[in-house]
Image (cartoon, helix red, strand yellow):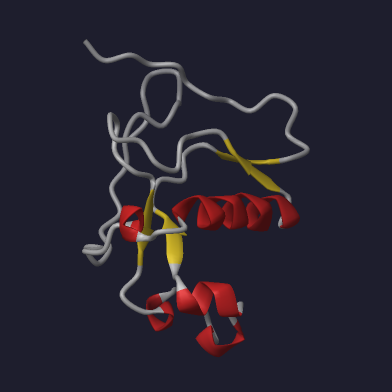
Amino acid sequence: MRDKYNHVSCGLEVQKFLKKSPRELPDIQDHVIWLEKALESCGYVYYDRFLSREWGDNIGLLDSYKDADYKNPEELPKVFKKTPIVIIDRDRIFRTDNNRPKILRESYD
């Protein structure tokens, strides 16, 4: 849905519920760093929190790497096969060469 300024104000995509939390991982910060570097190597940057107790986590764990929406899951990196972390909120992913990303600032009362 878009507002009168043509900004996306909401959207809905239904996926399988992710039961596992990445917070359960003893080395979660290492995985977050890997995810940031993987995004950067593809030319993207993430302007949001991956983990937030206050606002909710923006990453989740697949039950299996085979659940990834990828044409040939066997080609995926070993680290992803072992710990299939995915981003579940993608509204603040931008290309690294985007000098003026359009980020709406909103607050909730």
- Residue under the image location 35 percent in, 70 percent down: 62
For this rendering, which residue is in front, 46 or 106? 46
- Residue under the image location 56 percent in, 73 percent down: 79
Residue 39 screen position, x and y as percent:
64, 53
Residue 70 screen position, x and y as percent:
51, 77
- Residue under the image location 28 percent in, 29 percent down: 54
Report which quarter residue 9 is drawn in. top left
Report which quarter residue 63 is drawn in. bottom left
Residue 13 screen position, x and y as percent:
30, 54
Does residue 85 appear to the left or right of 37 in the view shown?
A: left
In the rendered image, the quadrant that contains the C terminus is top left
In the rendered image, the quadrant that contains the N terminus is top left
Does residue 107 appear to the left or right of 96 in the view shown?
A: left
**In the image, farthest residue toward the right:** 97
Residue 27 screen position, x and y as percent:
47, 58
Does residue 13 appear to the left or right of 33 in the view shown?
A: left
For this rendering, which residue is in front, 72 or 48? 48
- Residue under the image location 35 percent in, 36 percent down: 52
